[in-house]
Image (cartoon, rainbow, N blue to C red):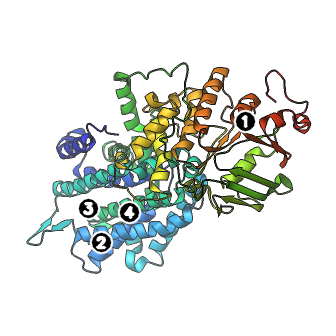
Amino acid sequence: MPTRQRPFLIEALTLLALIAAPFVLPYLGFNPTTINRILIWGLVGIGFDLLFGFTGLLSFGQAAFFGTGGMFAAYLLTEVGFGNTVAAALIGMIVAGIVGYFIGLLALRRTGIYFAMITVAIAEVFFFLEFNPLSAYTGGENGLPGVPPPNLNLGFTTLTFSSNLEMYGFFAFWYFVGLVIALRLVRSPVGLLLRAIRDNPLRAQALGHNIHSYKLTVFVVAAMYSGFAGSLLGMMQGFMPPDAFMFHTSGEIVMQTAIGGAGWLFGPLLGAAVWLYLADFFQTTLNLGATWKLVLGIVFVLLIVFLRHGMVGAIVDLYRLVRPPKPVPPAPAVVTVNPGEDKLLRRKATASTSGAILQVTGLTKRYGGLVANSDIDFRVDHGEIRGIIGPNGAGKSTFFKMLTCEVIPTSGKIVFDGRDITSLGVADACQLGLTKSYQINQLFDRLTVRQNLAIAALGELRGKFKLDMLKSVSKVPGLDPQIARTAKLVHLGDRLDTPVSELAYGEKRRLEIGLALATSPSLLLLDEPLAGMSPQERVETVALLKAIAVGRTMIVIDHDMDSLFELVERITVLQEGRVLVEGTPDEIRNNAAVQEAYLGGIDDETGVA
């Protein structure tokens, strides 16, 4: 990604490379037709890379959109008598996007391998439709011949691009436009959220984002890229081939992206160059006949094995080896936190400032014959710091998940800030101001601290879903101050540009809390914030929690009794999914039923169960 000081460096270098390519590549053994074909596959690959490399959605159905857009444009140009090739290509792109929208509604109901298999089935359905019921419009196995070369109507004259070099200029222009749009998208808030979905979709959703709508958006965008590129293919060849719909077309898109490197936008173009050059070399130069596919398959396997991040990734790794990044300053040995120093953090407004902010009645959760929670009544007032304890298996985690709408209760009612949220989703609960930090860190490990906090803050600043795809992340009003204040509070201000994977465990725990704080919660739930920490890290985090607790409503689960009793005002004890007792820390510490629940009581010296 470009720096803020050189925001258009990538675009400028790409433009220079595109200008030089038709004059340099022939000396490397590329024929002009192959060069043009590389641009078309590279354009398809940009959309696929947005889908797979940036969002983590592996689709084997891009051929359906590639063929649909291409066939629709070819039909307009050959059968309808449409003369404007650019307009026909744009219409084909829109049709592919519409088809992608409806297919996405179906396919995105599943994730992982099931999503991939649905896209395979969809590609096969479209192949069948092209060859049989719609053959009168698509030409069936013959395709649609007579597609005119690309032209550009300027009003006073029409430019026709008929030679290979002229076509290259036309295709290169549209590839550059497609790349610039994609770069703007990945630099936008939407682009950052796509990477969040790729790394940890459930956490992105818990931070208030409608991940299904964002996935559907990028699915449609990828379909539109494929449809437009399919239109260009028909113009280049003079006919729209039926194999555009075939499964091997989708397979080639995946393999070219894997060879070039996913998540860079340029990977598919470089992968297409390698793939098509080797295909020509094995067939025409070495005359391998049908064996060329076997040899090319072996080469593909070798490239994937030895270049795990693709060719672009290998180039980036080599650059970093030659010019290593500046060393990251070590984390401070001791963290001191002043209570109330988070007073400038944004907080969602509530309907009232007194009385109950959370009221739970008869909350029950059953998993078949297992009852995780049974008939729980629970109330937390504005400004209260409530602790929840209980032995392992008491139902604390399930209870927390129901409070944040991650799990729908079997029965009962949850009222937050005067609103019944029992049947809401976790993103909606976060948007209302109910946010949770997790017992096991749920971070975006491939991103930086700054990007992690930005993902959390964007949900509060932009809402659950917004298509600001051409707007820079840095231009979101209030984002940078929110990130800076949150980072300062959790003492990660000097680590903002550090990848999360390089943080120490204690820093990751503080960042986990920071993600919840950056959403501006009016009620913050902390699930075992001290879990797995060293004694020094516990001291630092307890100091942090004391600062956060000032003037804030919080519910905390933890097994460190001394720390919890020091922090909270009132404690609820769960046992076997029910409320055993509630009271002040002193009342709970001396309660015989609580000591019995912990199988022998609480250690007088450590205070830990």
State the residue position of label 2: 145
Q: Nearer the viewer, residue 81 or 275?
A: 81
Q: Nearer the viewer, residue 579 or 257?
A: 579
State the residue position of label 3: 236
* Any part of residue 509 in sight: no
Question: Callout 4: few (<14), some (14-19), or many (20+) C-alpha neighbours within 10 Å?
Answer: many
First reached walking from the N terminus: tag 4 or tag 1: 4
Answer above or below: position of 428 versus 303: below
Q: Amino acid at mark 2?
A: Pro
Q: Nearer the viewer, residue 235 or 486?
A: 486
First reached walking from the N terminus: tag 3 or tag 2: 2
Q: Name the spot of residue 62 as percent of width and height, x first.
A: 45, 59
**Distance in Å between CA atoms under marks 1 and 3:** 65 Å
Answer above or below: position of 270 versus 370: above
Tag shown at residue 224: 4
First reached walking from the N terminus: tag 1 or tag 3: 3
Q: Secondary structure at mark 1?
A: loop
Q: Amino acid at mark 1?
A: Asp
First reached walking from the N terminus: tag 4 or tag 3: 4
Q: Name the spot of residue 322 as percent of width and height, x first.
A: 34, 22
Q: Residue at x 35, y 72 (%)?
A: 72
Q: Amino acid at mark 3?
A: Met
